[in-house]
Image: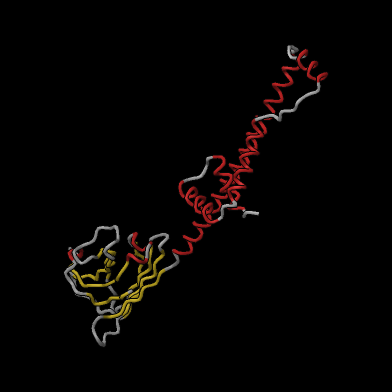
Amino acid sequence: MASEHIQLLIAGYVLGDLDPHEAAEFQQLLIENPAIALEVDQMQRVLELSYAALEVQPSSDLRSKILAAQTSPPIRQTRRSFSWSRAINLAAAVIIAALAINNYRLSQELQMSHRETQRLATLVYSLQATAEGNAASARVKVDPNRLEAVLTVQNLSPLPPGKVYALWTVVSEDAPVTRDDKSAILTDVFNVDAQGNASQSILVPKVYRSANWVSNIAVTIEDATAPQNHQGKPVLITKL
């Protein structure tokens, strides 16, 4: 007995309701298991029987009565009712099969959505100072579903007026985003307090929804009036 998934593929094939992906999967199943063709044939026969009434040879006496009654309105009405009843039953069978296929597809989509939600779990990036002996560090905790993050910085030297720290997201070559000549996206700017600490919520670019697109996160010192020029060298960085 074929599995429920295969049964639904068979029903979809007979009803002509398979999408290209399902059609390719069904074709592969037929190659791997030719016995499925028998079940396809059986289902097609069932549907064909729904369209046509069984032919039975009546006795001579019954044939005469049928021929004599062919012009009778009640008989014609009864036969018409039977035809409509058969059509309604067939339509109901088709609807039930279609609903079963749609329910299966919905279940698959929900499972994929659940897997996608699990895949987009919270991401945590740790940044360390590039200079030896520097105890500065930072952490970026990203919620890729909402594209929000919390930036936490410790022991980073306070800057003079006119300077800011810039947080950069360095992306891979295949990331479908606009980046500067250092393959970086200016993500946010910040300053630290007198103790060299900072904590703030920031927005992050869409590349964080695919970890493969983020190759580095870095912090540089930039002019407050034009941090996007990306002139400074990294003072904090992490390699992923």
Q: Is residue 137 visible?
A: yes
x then y, percent, for residue 209: 38, 61
Instruction: Tell me what residue is drawn at x 81 percent, y 23 percent.
Output: 59
x then y, percent, for residue 95: 61, 38
Q: Quadrant of the N terminus?
A: bottom right
Instruction: Tell me what residue is drawn at x 27 percent, y 80 percent.
Output: 129
> For this rendering, which residue is in front, 56 or 110?
56
x then y, percent, for residue 77: 72, 18
Q: Quadrant of the C terminus?
A: bottom left
x then y, percent, for residue 85: 69, 28
Among all residues in the image, which is located at the extreme front?
A: 60
Residue 11 falls in image quadrant = top right
Instruction: Tell me what residue is drawn at x 56 percent, y 55 percent.
Output: 33
Q: Is residue 7 left or right of residue 149?
A: right
Q: Is residue 147 left or right of residue 70?
A: left
Residue 214 falls in image quadrant = bottom left
Among all residues in the image, which is located at the extreme right?
A: 61
Vertical position of residue 211 compared to residue 72: above or below? below
> For this rendering, which residue is in front, 120 or 201?
120
Vertical position of residue 39 compared to residue 79: above or below? below
Q: Is residue 234 left or right of residue 7?
A: left
Q: How is the image coloured?
A: secondary structure
